[in-house]
Image (cartoon, rainbow, N blue to C red):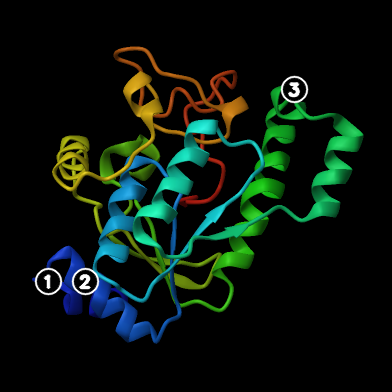
Amino acid sequence: MIATLKQELEGLDVVAKLKYLAEKSKNKIVFSTSFGWEDQVVTHLIFANNIPIKVFTLETGRLFPETYYVWNRTLEIYQKPIHAYFPQNDLLQNMVNAKGPSSFYESIENRKECCYIRKIEPLKRALAGNEIWITGIRADQSTNREGMEDVEWDEGNQLFKFHPIFDWTLEDVKHYVKDNNIVYNTLHDKGFPSIGCAPCTRAVREGEDFRAGRWWWEDQSKKECGLHATS
């Protein structure tokens, strides 16, 4: 199936690919944004071309003020909805009552629990019933993603994933943002290549790995929350 889908998309430009997938999936297609500049590029491609792809985000409750600004400006500019998925109240309440608001600093187990409640479980609800999941992933964003391709089968969520700007470089993204006057998160200008929850993200120093600013207190080489886990 993946080979067939890749063949069907071959030779199409990025907008044509998104339009083709939207038609093929009969509206069972979604795009997840966290409002980083890659995601802002894909949001622009979808909204500016009126492609019928549902755009959603995970409202973890711990986002940066700059992220909320980009979210709101994006709504104002395109006048199209971005659907928010929140953590389940009981799960979040029980975790915070039992362990406090910053338990994720105490152990990898606690951090993964927080990521599950704030991101993974809401993501599963957002993806349920869909056939295709669009993302803003690029190939060179981390070593964890070297084995990925632009079209994949997500076994855990039972759908196809398509990464429309998979082969773009960071410079490609920056140029596209500038050329199309796309609103973006100003934290990118302050050393934040990857922007997640505020307590779990810091700026990176020159020469550091792309994702060094995520969960920086953990001593491990593969730091993913599980949204785009690879085998």
Q: Are marks 3 and 2 in contact (CB under 8 Å)?
A: no
* Residue annotated with mark 3: 106
- Callout 1 crowding tier (Cα within 10 Å): few <14, some 14–19, many ≥20: few
* Residue annotated with mark 2: 17
Dot placed on the residue nearer the N-terminal end, 3 or 2:
2
Q: CA distance from mark 1 to mark 3?
A: 48 Å
Residue positioned 44% across, 52% down in the render: 33
Q: Amino acid at mark 1?
A: Leu
Dot placed on the residue nearer the N-terminal end, 1 or 2:
1
Q: CA distance from mark 3 to mark 2?
A: 44 Å
Secondary structure at badge 3 equals loop
Q: Assign the N terminus to one quadrant of the image.
A: bottom left
Q: Amino acid at mark 2?
A: Lys
Residue 67 point in image, percent of width and height = 49, 38
Residue 99 point in image, percent of width and height = 86, 31
Can you say whether 91 is above or below 1 in the image?
A: above
Secondary structure at badge 1 equals loop
Instruction: Say which of marks 3 and 2 sits in front.
Output: 2
Q: Are marks 1 and 3 in contact (CB under 8 Å)?
A: no
Q: Are marks 1 and 2 in contact (CB under 8 Å)?
A: yes
- Callout 2 crowding tier (Cα within 10 Å): few <14, some 14–19, many ≥20: some
Q: CA distance from mark 1 to mark 2?
A: 6 Å
Q: Amino acid at mark 3?
A: Glu
Res 191 quadrant in image: top left
Residue positioned 13% across, 72% down in the render: 10
Horizontal side of 7 relative to 204 (left or right) equals left
* Residue annotated with mark 1: 12
Horizontal side of 148 relative to 60 (left or right) equals left
Horizontal side of 110 relative to 220 (left or right) equals right
Residue positioned 49% across, 20% down in the render: 202
Along the viewing direction, whichever of 95 and 65 lies nearer the viewer: 65
Residue positioned 40% across, 40% down in the render: 144
